[in-house]
Structure formats: C-alpha cells, structure tokens
Amino acid sequence: MEKKKLSKNSIFPDANTRRRRRRIKFAKVPTIHFQDEIMMDILRRDNQNSKKILIAERLVNKDETFSFYTSSLSMVEDKQKLDWPTSCNPVDARTFCSCDGLVLTRVCSKMFDEELLLWNPSTRESILLPHPEYRIMTYVFGLEYDATSEGYKILAVKLNGKKSINISIEFLSIKRNSSWRRIDYPTDIQRVRGFRDCGTDNLAFLHGAFHWLDKSTSGYYTTVSLNISNEVYGEVPLLKQMYDLCPLYFFFDHGVSVLRGMLCFYSTYNKISRSTNGIFNLWVMKDYGVRESWTSFIKIRDTDLFLSARPVYMFADCQVLLHFQRFGYFSSNFTTSGRPFDLCPECDTTKRGIVYAESFISPTSLLT
C-alpha cells in the first residue's frame, strides 16, 4: 500500500525527517506486546469517526505566543487555526479534558489571572465557569455526562499539595448558578507525585467513575475511582511489577488513562546514567477490576532520555499517539508508539492537546 506524504506542518514527522532519523542508531526498535484477543477487542471498540486533536501551541521566546488549532487524526494534515474562546490576550493556556465535543479549557491573561471555560471548538461557543477553591492549575480535571442526574459534571482533584491533607476533591454540576462542592478524600490513600503535575493530564473515566493514581498508606500504588453518580470511592489494584523496578532506575512519570475502553497504566523510567536506556511501559487491563488481567501492551527502550511520555489516543492499528517531553528542551510534542523518542520536538515550542469528538452541543444550553 502506498504511504501518504506528510505535510511539514503536521504534528507527525514528514518524509524528510524520517529519512534523516534512519541514519540515527537506536538501541532497540520499539516493541509492542499484546495477545491476539486484545487486538480483536481493540478493533471492536474502534470508533474514530469525527475524532480530532485540539492543540494548544506555545512559541517560547517569541512574545510567549499561544495559539489553538485543530487537526485530523489521520496522517493527512488539515490543520486549522482557531480563535481564542475568550476576548483576553492570553499568556498561557491548557486544555484539560473533553466529553461529547465539549472541552474544559484554562486560559491565563497574566500571572494568577485565570479563567476556566467550557468550550465547543466546533461551534466556537464557550461559557465561563466558576473557580474551584484553589488555583486552577493545581488541579487535575475530569468532565463527563452523568445519566442519573441527566447533566454534565466536572470533577477537580487537587493532587499537588505537599501533604495529603491538602488533597481537595470538588464536584461542579454544569447548570445555572451552580458552585463547586467539596467532598471528603479517603483517609487511607495518599497522593502520588509525578512530573510537575502528578503524572496525569486528566482524570480517566471508565464504567461510570473517574480514576487516578495514588498510593496507599501501606506503600503500594493503586488506582482510586470515584463514581460520578453516587460519589462512592473504589479501588482498582495494580501489579507490583508494574511500578516496582530495579533501584538503579529513576522514576520520572506515571499515571492512568483510558484507551479504547480499557483502563491503562503508563510509566516512564530511566537510569541515573544518561548513556543507558530509558523505559516507557504501557499496560492495559483486559477485564476491568480483575487485577490479574493487567497485561504489558507496549514497552519502548530508548537511549535518548525523556522526562515523560503520556498516551493520548489509540488508533485502529493499535499505534498509540503519545505526548512527550525531553531533557534539555523547554518543549514538548507528539509522536506515535511506532517511532523512536529520538524524534526531536520543534525547538522552543510546546504542544499540548487532547482528542475530542466534534458535536453541536451548545455550552449555553446547559445553563438551565
């Protein structure tokens, strides 16, 4: 089958870049570990119609310029720049999560002057949401539809306090005159610190509950769940070998996400020496809630150090779109699991983004 030519402006490397990279010697070709039944299960869940990726791009040292653009998930580039969802002149922006075409976005016009918006990039409509108790950037967010209350809810989890007592869990129902409501956090769970923002970009949502990675008071890592309707906590345990590596390895980043309807655990480790291989692992849970069903799905070894790699989306062919950051660069970019991490991000550019499904849901219509 003939391969399609990539645009030089694509988030994926173009043909010339790929030819240059072939001259680089890699320690090991990235390998994907999966069983046939996992592959078939993923293909059954494939539904990428109308899926796009929304990118917030920052050009460092160029007046700190930010811009939003949307692009197809296919290899054919159809990059489209979007107007800001607010009238301010932002110096910072972040897309947290999405549901049914609605995107939770934070923009900042100056230091500590933050706005939290619910935005539909397809219709260009947005509404301003109330602030949670603390600064917006100290939270990890999740946005989903609650069938019981027949409305959308946002869960904000503040995980980056220095002590477990600083963990804050807040719910917001998206309706007129709503406000954030704080709920208690389990006393036998302490927070996990990842790279900068606690090892996750957003809360994973599966089987009616939000999920995030934490640590028990006895010292083992676990996945905490919180039901969106009855607000009951649960736990999805991990296997010890998923996070307990050789002491020579230094931990950088790990967290949980959802890919193709499966709960996933991802981690980035490296050895102290910069000349040795770093390791990225991605595990999938074949049967939700069954601890023994955790299966190693992707394992990448690379001589080039990277700070973190986080899964964003899984394609029909089981390639995974990854957002990654590296040592020595104030930049971040996207790649796929089939390409080595030595692919260098564009200099002085940071790209963060989420995958969303286009829709015509009006954020204003939710305020009833």
Image (cartoon, helix red, strand yellow):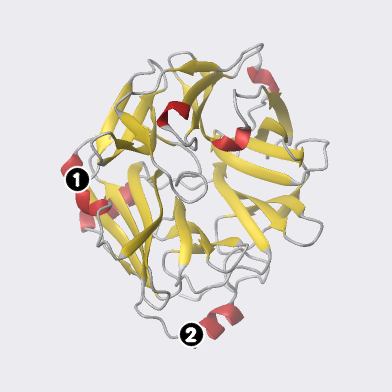
In primary-sequence order, the first of circles 2 and 1 is: 2
Q: Where is residue 330 in the image (x, y as percent from the top left)?
A: 63, 62
Relative horizontal placement of residue 222, taking residue 256 as reference (left or right): left
Q: Which of 192 and 299 is in front in this view?
A: 192
Q: Are marks 2 and 1 in contact (CB under 8 Å)?
A: no
Relative horizontal placement of residue 318, taking residue 48 as reference (left or right): left
Q: Say what amino acid the circle numbered 2 marks.
A: Arg
| Picture quadrant of residue 130 | top right
SS at mark 2 in the image: helix
Q: Position of residue 14 (x, y in %)?
A: 60, 74
Q: Can residue 274 be seen in this view?
A: yes
Residue named by callout 2 = 22
Q: At 82% from the left edge and 37% from the top edge, which residue is drawn?
A: 88
Q: Nearer the viewer, residue 163 or 262?
A: 163
Crowding near pointer 2: few (<14 within 10 Å), some, many (20+)?
Answer: few
Q: At 47% from the left edge and 24% from the top edge, which residue is drawn?
A: 169
| Picture quadrant of residue 357 | top right
Q: Say what amino acid the circle numbered 1 marks.
A: Ser
Q: Nearer the viewer, residue 29 or 255?
A: 255
SS at mark 1 in the image: helix
Q: In the rendered view, would you say 152 is above or below 343?
A: above
Crowding near pointer 1: few (<14 within 10 Å), some, many (20+)?
Answer: some
Residue named by callout 1 = 293
In which quadrant of the rendered image does the N terminus lie?
bottom left
Q: Nearer the viewer, residue 302 or 221?
A: 221
Q: Where is residue 143 in the image (x, y as percent from the top left)?
A: 52, 30
Q: How many numbered discs, if any?
A: 2
Q: Where is residue 250 in the image (x, y as percent from the top left)?
A: 36, 61
